Amino acid sequence: MAKKTKIAVIGMGYVGIPAAALLADVEGFDVIGLQRRSKSSGWKIDALNKGECPILNEPDLPELIKRVVLEKKSFRVTDDTDILKDMDYILIDVQTPTDKETHEPLYLSLREVTATVGKKMRKGAVVALESTVAPGTTEFIVKTILEENSGMKTGEDFHLVFAYERVMVGRLINNIVNYPRIIGGITEECSKKGLWLYKHIVNEELISVSATTAEVAKVVENTY
């Protein structure tokens, strides 16, 4: 039997749930969603593990979740961060809200999650940041935290890409599958690793650029 590609998706929200479900529908992929058992979102763990979709009025998503959870058994959700130790790919999909007064991004959750990933990930893992962030965040914040907590070097011991999603309620699946995707790697090898993953769920062109260029593209896209 061929070895399965193990993927963790951190954050079961509008970005993480559809991404995890689509990846779990790929033959040979085994996906685990990671979600904190908080008062506001902890209920999603049990709901998803029953094959139920926590997001309402989203075409194709309920059927997809039911299939990958109950039939294929290729997707489950947990709050146990130790699962990160075995993952080939780790997607970070946590919220990055902005300060109401200064409009500056608040990265508390992102920093905490990234530190946990750094402490737990194995050598050779590929980390993909999908959360919306300001230009420079992947290289100067996420990369630094991962290296400090893992003792490993980006592009040699592990790989890091920024691969933002277009979140539009009512079109979550469509916007992942049917739009070109920009993959921003810290190194060329990082980009190659990212391109390999996303080619399985994106039907349109995959564009390889630097991480910061990808972040700038996301900011410009959000502006318009």
Image (cartoon, rainbow, N blue to C red):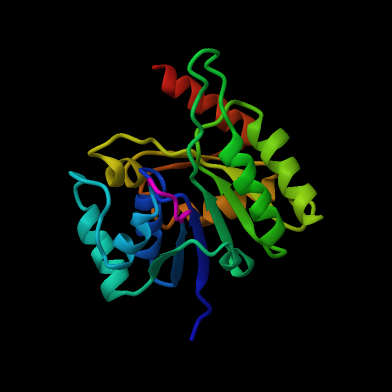
Q: Position of residue 138 (x, y in %)?
A: 64, 37
| Quadrant where the C terminus is found in the figure | top left
- Above or below residue 65? Residue 137 is above
All told, the count of numbered labels is: 0
- Above or below residue 162? Residue 3 is below
Quarter of the image holding residue 90?
A: bottom right
* Residue at 62 percent of width and 36 percent of height: 211
Quarter of the image holding residue 78?
A: bottom left
From the viewer's perspective, tell me whether residue 141 is left or right of residue 106: right
Q: Position of residue 163 (x, y in %)?
A: 52, 41
Q: Is residue 156 magenta?
A: no
Seen from the viewer's position, the closer of residues 46 and 190 is 46
Q: Position of residue 107 (x, y in %)?
A: 59, 33
Find the residue positioned furthest to the bottom.
Answer: 1
* Visible residue check, residue 154: no
| Magenta region, main secondary structure | loop
* Residue at 20 percent of width and 60 percent of height: 63
From the viewer's perspective, tell me whether residue 99 is left or right of residue 124: left
- Above or below residue 61? Residue 169 is above
Span highlighted in magenta in the image: 35-40
Q: Position of residue 203 (x, y in %)?
A: 35, 49
* Residue at 77 percent of width and 49 percent of height: 147
* Visible residue check, residue 173: yes
Find the residue positioned furthest to the top.
Answer: 101
From the viewer's perspective, tell me whether residue 187 is left or right of residue 43: right
